Amino acid sequence: MRVLYAEAVYDDEEISAVLNVLKNNPHQLMSGENVRKFEQQVAKIFGKNYGIMVNSGSSANLLAINSLGLKPGSEIITPALTFSTTVAPIVQLGLVPAFVDVEPSTFVIDCGLIEEMITENTKAMLIPNLIGNLPDWNRIKQLADKYSLIVMEDSADTIGYSFDGGNTGQINDVVTSSFYASHIVTGAGFGGIMCTNNEAFAESATIMRSWGRASSLRDESEEVDQRFNTKVDGIEYDAKFMFNSMGYNFIPSELSAAFGLVQLKKLEKYKVIRQENYLALLNYFRLYEEFFILPSQLNITDTPMLAFPFIIKDGAPFSRRDMQIWFEENGIQTRTVFTGNILRHQGFKHIDRKESPSGYPNSNRVMSGGMLIGCHHGINNIQLDYIQETLKNFIGSR
């Protein structure tokens, strides 16, 4: 039997939506009506007025940070246990990540350690809902208000969650998400989005998404009166090639958006299955809790998890390597918990950063003993039983 860590689940409805674009819209395969609908629907889910769809969640993070217009050297607070492209755009834009440790069982930022990292140079926080779990966004909002910080939520790993009875739209200034193949909703393997209520942020991101062209704000109109009424440095010019900023090509695909719109209709069903699978795995692992630190969630959250995380305790009669090899040889895909402590990776060892006086004991612990297995909506009860049997056999073999 094969149990994948992640799986894109779709059927003829998504395929038909993509074929419809290819057959009926051959001259608009990017950033058309499907993209606009997808932006509106996802922005609503996150409690925002504006959605700017892009080609990936990584691109969304880069656009989100860039749209803030922060001065080089400004500090952005972010956790040490993370994903690479949460941190990379901070560094790429000449800003300084200020790293905070995580909680050992939630795998998200330890809000009790944030305040000690705030200085006069701190301008924002970029905090992920890692693996789909949610930090204490109320506490984050309190700190942001106290120190006048911009709040960016990296929700690449989850969508459609509930926090304290609602969403986090009134807490964050910007939220990003990803529609990569392994995520809860996918845009045929690709796609990302930045959502905000800030019109200036949205306009900046929209222009930068499309090479920096000012015409991006007018839906790339072909109308003559819109195209030929402008000048560049005194020269009459076609507005389609007027560049107001240095941008990127992060333009989204109509195919991804059409696929994603169908996926959004199934989101509630997907959430229920993921939550049921997560709880089933949690119950299995509780039988052997002496060997594992098991995941926990705030009681005011209701979130579909990306995967099932756990940490092998010090003193267990096996290592993570032992467990991963056993599971992999028995057809169950495994992963480590993303970066672990990202500062220990070659690509990030020497970046300009601010480190916590408390160190990163929990991020290091996750790095040495953390592991992920799937709990996605493609896993059925037979596969869940197989995971339980494989876990039982592994523990019994030690």
Image: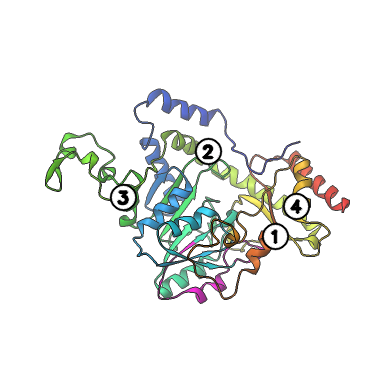
* Relative to 149, residue 213 above or below: above
Q: CA distance from mark 1 to mark 2?
A: 30 Å
Nearer mark to the viewer, of 2 and 3? 3
Q: Which residue is mark 1?
A: 368
Q: CA distance from mark 1 to mark 3?
A: 41 Å
Q: Quadrant of residue 198?
A: bottom left
Q: Quadrant of residue 370?
A: bottom right
* Residue 114 lies in the magenta-colored region: yes
Q: Which residue is mark 3?
A: 246
Q: Earlier in the sequence, mark 4 or mark 1?
A: 4
Q: Earlier in the sequence, mark 1 or mark 3?
A: 3
* Residue 398 lies in the magenta-colored region: no
Q: CA distance from mark 2 to mark 3?
A: 27 Å
Q: Which residue is mark 2?
A: 189
Residue 289 in percent (x, y) is at 79, 60
Q: Amino acid at mark 1?
A: Ser
* Relative to 80, residue 21 above or below: above
**Is label 3 in a helix, a strand or a loop?**
loop
* Relative to 109, residue 45 above or below: above
Q: CA distance from mark 4 to mark 2?
A: 29 Å
